[in-house]
Structure formats: C-alpha cells, structure tokens
Image (tube, helix red, strand yellow):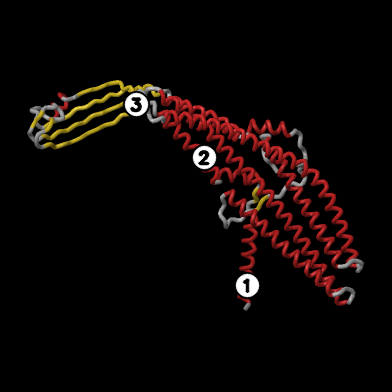
C-alpha cells in the first residue's frame, strides 16, 4: 500500500512538472505575430503570389516571341513502283530507299507592332500582379486585426459573464437562507435560481463565441485545428481616440498608397495596349525564313556520305502576309478592346468609390465610437454603483429579487455596451491609421 502511494505521488509530481513546462513554453501571439504569420502562410496570399509568378512567365514568353525559332527534321522512306525520286526529282520505276534531314528557322520582322505591344502589356500586368498581391496581403491584415479584436472582446465578455454567474450564485445562497428563515416567498427564490441559470447560459454562450473567433483566426493563419493559440491582451494605457486629419485628407492619402488604386490604373493601361495589339491585325506581317537540308537516295551511284555533300542545299526568303478580309475578326477584336478599356475605367471608378466609402465609414464610426465610449463608460459606472447599492438593499431585505435581477441585467448591459464601444473605437482608429499608410499596432 505504501509503495502504491509513492508511485501516485511521483506520477502527480511528474504531471505538475509537465504542466509547468507546457505553460512556460506556450507561445503568446501578439497582433504583429499573427499578421506576419498570416502573410507567410495564408493560402489567399499564396494564390496571389502564384498569379504574380504566372505574370512573370507570360512576360518572358512575350519577350521570347522576338527570337527566331529553329526546327530540325529527319525522314526515312521506302518507295516501290513508279515514283519521283525525292532527291533528284527524276521519274523512276525502281525501289528507292531515301533519307532526308534538315534545319529550318523563321523570325517575324514586323507584325503590326503587335509583338512590342504584347511585351509592353505583359510588363504592365507583371507590375499589376505585384499590387494585387499587396492588396491580398492588406485584406488578410485587416481580417486578422478584426478577428484579433473580436477575440479580446469575447475574452472580456467571458469575464463579465463569470462575475455575473458568481454574483447570482451568491444571491441564490442568500435567497435560500432567507427562504428558510421565512423572510421571502418561494417565487423570489426561484427567480434567483432562474437568473443564475440564465447567467450560466450566457457564460456558455460567451465561451462558444470566443472559440468561434479563435477558429476563424486559426483559419486565417492556416494553423492546425489541434493547435492551441493564446493572444496577447491590450495595453490599457494606449489612447485610441485621436483623429488628427479630416476624412478628405485621409481619403486622398489612401488613393495614393493603396495598391488596388495602382492596380486599377495599370488595368486601364494594359487594356489600352490590348487595343494597340488588336489594331495591329489590320497591318501586314513580314517574316524571314531559312533552311538547310540534305538527303540520300539508293538509286544514286554516290555513297551515302558523298550524297550528303552533293545534295546539300540552303534556302533563305521573305514572306509577306497582307490581311484583306478575315471575316471581321480584327474589327471585332478592336471593338472588344475598346469595351475592355471602358470597363477598366469603370472598375477604377468603382475602386475609388469603394475606398471613399471605407474611409468615410471608418471616420464617422471612429467619431461616433469615441462619443459612445465616453457615454458607455459613464453609464457603466452609474449602473455599477446602482447594482452595488441594490445588492446591499437586498442583503438587508429592502429589495425584492426581481428588482435585484433588473439592476444586475442593467449593469451587465452597460458593461457590454462599454466593451463594444471600446473595441469598435480601437478597430476604426486602426483602420484610419491603415488608410494613411501607418502601421497597425496595438
């Protein structure tokens, strides 16, 4: 029996050391940690990076179209009966074994300037892909920020719910004692029990809300579902209430730094190059062609190696193709390119309009949340004092359970309003900093 006790003690000590080690090595994620990890691992950003790589490949392909091509060919044939000698072009009736080898090359000298315009368009698309990658990163950064603050909000909501549950459980105990003493009715006691159950439900719901936000953050970070994550709490001494610039100034700054604006401008330029490419279809194409070849035929008296010297031939030439009528394909391509330009301009207007909406919304909400925060803090303090007074009256028997429950619910609502105003103020302040090109820091 003593030996069993020793084993149990050792096992418990080992568990304690393991828990201490785990707690000491547990990583606390700051907002900057989350942002950096998301930029490195988020699949949306990876997809944008792959699109950028594809744009580089397309640009390389367009530049390579200036180069000449080179093809090699070889053939071996057997002919029986009346035929044409493939080397001498003589009419023969004998069996012929023939071999042909050759090299051919061509280069486009002029193609309506389409090659140069295609290269220029692809260069614009490469630059645009960089801005689109930055836009994807910015979207993930803002999503991480919003989710990070939601987690902090939910954690404070759990603290409120836990305190409420603890208070109501104490109130249930006091109500039970007063019921046993005959100073309150059974309905007052059951109402206290009902409030305790309601607060327990609220605590469970608050914990579930926190887990949902944690799951969403882990999705943004591309973390393993089984991996635990703990985020750093806020520095309560930081002031998030200053707005130094007016919304028009912030909007103009946003237009100058946000990558989606630059991407929209490049989209217009690329569409204009597309029009130049389409118009090139009206112009002729001039190509330079050349080839080298030789062959062997079995009916020739020369040897195989001699025939390759004798039959060696070279050719060089120019090829001119003049478009006369191609079933309106070029005309249709030009019209399509013109439509694409107008669509790109509309897309730019839509982008600027969306940015203005985001800036104005964040600006107005920042102003509103500042005022709401001040009012909510005052309301919370007043509700707290009222609830403390109600608790004292309840303990002295001067207040019914219903009135105490109402007072507690009022205080809880005031706390939740304060939390909401607090984190909305932080969120919109950070959004305004972001639209000005400043770093997001908590």
Q: Is residue 373 left or right of residue 233?
A: right
- Name the front one of labels 3 and 1: 3
Q: Is residue 332 left or right of residue 202?
A: left
Q: Which residue is mark 2?
A: 49
Q: Which residue is mark 3?
A: 68
Q: Residues within 10 Å of mark 2 (few under 14, many from 20)?
A: some
Residue drawn at (73%, 34%) of the image? 247
- In this view, the residue in front, 108 or 6, is 108
Q: Answer whether residue 438 is visible to the viewer in this image.
A: no
Q: Earlier in the sequence, mark 3 or mark 2?
A: 2
Question: How much space separates mark 3 and mark 1, taking CA atoms?
Answer: 86 Å
Q: Which mark is residue 6?
A: 1
Describe the element under mark 1 as helix, strand or loop.
helix
Q: Earlier in the sequence, mark 3 or mark 1?
A: 1
Name the image quarter holding residue 248: top right
Q: Is residue 155 left or right of residue 93?
A: right
């Amino acid at each position: 029996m003593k030996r069993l006790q020793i084993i149990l003690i050792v096992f418990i000590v080992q568990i304690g050391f393991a828990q201490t080690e785990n707690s000491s090595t547990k990583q606390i994620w700051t907002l900057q940690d989350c942002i950096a990890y998301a930029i490195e691992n988020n699949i949306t950003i990876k997809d944008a990076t792959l699109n950028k790589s594809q744009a580089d490949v397309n640009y390389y392909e367009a530049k390579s179209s200036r180069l000449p091509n080179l093809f090699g060919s070889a053939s071996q044939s057997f002919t029986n009966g009346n035929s044409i000698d493939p080397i001498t072009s003589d009419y023969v009736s004998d069996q012929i074994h023939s071999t042909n080898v050759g090299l051919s090359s061509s280069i486009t000298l002029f193609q309506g300037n389409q090659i140069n315009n295609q290269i220029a368009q692809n260069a614009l698309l490469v630059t645009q892909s960089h801005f689109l990658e930055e836009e994807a990163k910015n979207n993930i950064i803002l999503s991480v920020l919003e989710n990070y603050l939601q987690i902090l909000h939910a954690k404070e909501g759990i603290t409120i719910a836990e305190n409420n549950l603890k208070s109501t459980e104490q109130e249930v105990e006091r109500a039970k004692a007063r019921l046993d003493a005959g100073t309150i009715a059974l309905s007052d006691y059951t109402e206290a029990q009902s409030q305790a159950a309601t607060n327990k439900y609220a605590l469970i719901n608050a914990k579930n809300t926190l887990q949902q936000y944690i799951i969403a953050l882990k999705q943004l970070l591309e973390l393993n579902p089984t991996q635990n994550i703990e985020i750093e709490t806020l520095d309560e001494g930081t002031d998030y209430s200053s707005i130094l610039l007016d919304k028009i100034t912030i909007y103009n700054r946003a237009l100058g730094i946000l990558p989606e604006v630059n991407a929209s401008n490049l989209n217009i330029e690329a569409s204009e190059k597309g029009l130049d490419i389409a118009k090139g279809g009206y112009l002729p194409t001039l190509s330079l062609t050349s080839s080298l070849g030789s062959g062997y035929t079995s009916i020739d008296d020369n040897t195989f190696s001699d025939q390759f010297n004798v039959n060696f031939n070279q050719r060089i030439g120019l090829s001119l193709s003049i478009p006369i009528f191609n079933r309106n394909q070029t005309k249709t391509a030009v019209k399509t390119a013109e439509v694409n330009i107008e669509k790109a301009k509309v897309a730019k207007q839509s982008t600027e309009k969306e940015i203005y909406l985001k800036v104005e919304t964040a600006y107005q909400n920042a102003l509103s949340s500042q005022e709401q925060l001040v009012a909510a803090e005052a309301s919370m303090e007043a509700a707290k004092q009222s609830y403390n007074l109600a608790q004292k009256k309840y303990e002295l028997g001067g207040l019914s359970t219903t009135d105490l429950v109402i007072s507690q619910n009022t205080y809880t609502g005031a706390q939740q309003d304060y939390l909401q105003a607090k984190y909305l103020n932080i969120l919109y302040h950070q959004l305004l900093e972001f639209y000005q090109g400043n770093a997001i820091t908590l």
